[in-house]
Image (cartoon, rainbow, N blue to C red):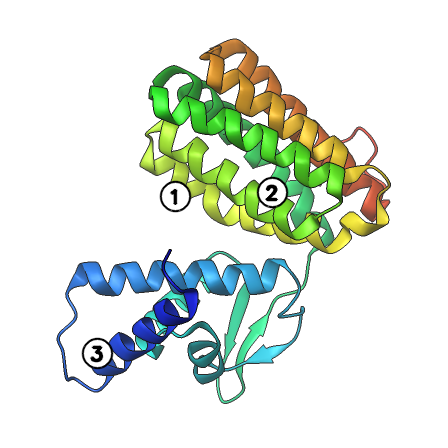
Amino acid sequence: MTDPGNQTQARQTQAGQIEAGQIEAGPADLGSMADQAYAGIEELIVSGTLPPRGFVSEKQLSAQLGIGRTPVREALKRLEMDGLVTIVPSRGIMVTEVDIKLQLYVLDVRRELERLIARRAARYALPEERERCRGIAGAMLDAARSGDGMRFMHLDQEVNQILDQCARNPVAAQTIRPLRSLSRRFWFQNHHTHSGSLEDGANTHADLMLAIHKGDVEAAAAASDRLMAYVENYARATLRYPFGDMAAP
């Protein structure tokens, strides 16, 4: 097994060489490092390690992630477009606040896209991908039973990744990515106030994963709708926002 510390050191060395111009980075290298930087910073934001309205610098993030400042800068541009950070001249990078109305607007759009992705995933998943879906379902239920919110969050990200991989629609995957990040941050920062939220979330995610495992397109669509209903009910219970059954204005 590769030592994670050695991996981080290797990334730091490569990133430093690229930054210093000692080695040339191709587009694939920069793209891969920017993706790593995006995933790392997104997790820091979603988990609350970087709190709303908190400031951080490119240099700090580069050091913390072990990734050069160029891919970190590219990742921050994407995160700003996704609504998770704001780049403030002369002050640094500020993590955005959770917006009450925005959360419900996000869910309106997510519901339609998630159903599309679920249908396609059930239809186009390969045999090994279907087995992975079954494994993720079991792991999510285990995480809920043990009350491990951080593991649940990582598995939630795996669910998103396998859905996009199986659906084989890069436009849908790119469109839904920022919406999921906003929802994940909201859920993670509030789940401790909801009794049974891990168990409920695990059950709805597991139903979706098992429907894809079976290749049942209609069951996958129905499970996706139940998952989005759970997320919306969770959001409304957290926010106690007076929309009731009416659409957000």
Q: Is residue 247 visible?
A: no
Of residues 82 and 40, the one nearer the viewer is 40
**98 relative to 91 in the view: left or right:** right
How packed is label 2: few (under 14 Cα within 10 Å), some, or many (20 or more)?
A: some
Query: Total of numbered circles in the picture?
Result: 3
Q: Distance between the residues labelled 2 and 1?
A: 15 Å
Q: Upstream in the sequence, badge 2 or badge 1?
A: 2
Q: Is residue 61 visible?
A: yes
The residue carrying mark 2 is 106
Q: Residue at x 67, y 68 (%)?
A: 52
Q: How far apart are marks 1 and 3 (CA)?
A: 28 Å
Q: Upstream in the sequence, badge 1 or badge 3?
A: 3
Q: Upstream in the sequence, badge 2 or badge 3?
A: 3
Q: Position of residue 60 (x, y in %)?
A: 49, 82
For mark 2, give the secondary structure. Answer: helix
* Residue 43 in which image quadrant: bottom right
How packed is label 1: few (under 14 Cα within 10 Å), some, or many (20 or more)?
A: few
* Residue 165 in which image quadrant: top left
Q: Confirm or deny contact between disc 2 and disc 3 (CB under 8 A).
A: no
Q: Position of residue 241 (x, y in %)?
A: 83, 44
Q: Which of marks 2 and 1 is in front?
A: 1
The residue carrying mark 1 is 174
The residue carrying mark 3 is 18
**10 relative to 243 in the view: left or right:** left
